[in-house]
Image: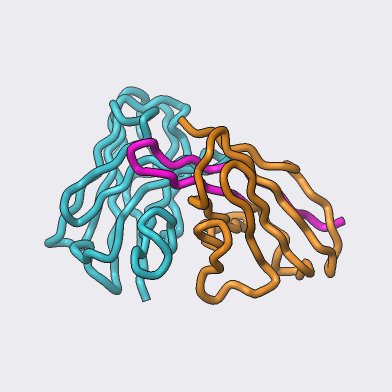
Chain colours: A orange, B cyan
Amino acid sequence: DIQMTQSPSTLSASVGDRVTITCRASQSISSWLAWYQQKPGKAPKLLIYKASSLDSGVPLRFSGSGSGTEFTLTISSLQPDDFATYYCQQYKSYSEGFTFGPGTKVDIK
Amino acid sequence: QLQLQESGPGLVKPSETLSLTCTVSGDSVSSDTYYWGWIRQPPGKGLEWIATIYYTGSTYYNPSLKSRVTISEDTSKNQFSLKLSSVTAADTAVYYCAGCHCPVTSCYTFDYWGQGTLVAVSS
């Protein structure tokens, strides 16, 4: 099965900072990667799919890049609403199953 | 706007079967544009995909849970369901139902989520 790792596990940042989160897959997943944002007590929200495509309504300060085994989520200018936990998800195929990364918590510095 | 709502017992005894239902409103579970799935999250931990179903009846399972999981749909009630057998304390989690909107994003990423329901496994 495909394992996902994320770094860092926790990130302390200030409003206005540029933030980058890295997600790595244990084998190539092409561009089959999504990013989600989750706030405490809430369901996750899809931000990005196919590594770099922004879901409808997601602010343009969010961007994704990468392919193969290494991917990044970047927030160009961190806003108060962005303090949350971020998860990556690989979806190479249903037959292999989907896996999420362990999450990166972005908190206030 | 598509909405999903989980329902089911909040407490299940060890070795018994956990049963949850997701009621869909705003579209049909028989629609060919959605895949429907279940994801869970143990308290304070990360997300784990459990299973997905498509209107054709095709089902897909997490290999690590496959022997204990059944996903099904009831088109007459516009619902889909999850059964997880032989539960242990490790199955205690918030269980989410979700939908993948194929034409918009992909058939594999979860665009729509229910609010989640906490299921505790305890005697």
Which is nearer the eye, B32 or B22? B32
Residue B22 included in the magenta stretch of the image: no
Residue at 82 percent of width and 58 percent of height = A108
Q: Quadrant of residue A24?
A: top right
Looking at the image, residue A6 lies above or below residue B36:
above
Looking at the image, residue B20 lies above or below residue A55:
above
Q: Position of residue A11 (x, y in %)?
A: 79, 49
Does A91 sit left or right of B103 as displayed?
Answer: right
Quarter of the figure with the C terminus of chain A: bottom right
Asked if one can make out residue B7 in the rendered structure from this viewpoint, the answer is yes
- Magenta residues span A87-109
Residue at 18 percent of width and 63 percent of height = B30
Which is nearer the eye, B59 or A23? A23
Asked if one can make out residue A102 in the rendered structure from this viewpoint, the answer is no
Q: Position of residue B120 (x, y in %)?
A: 44, 37
Q: Quadrant of residue B121?
A: top left
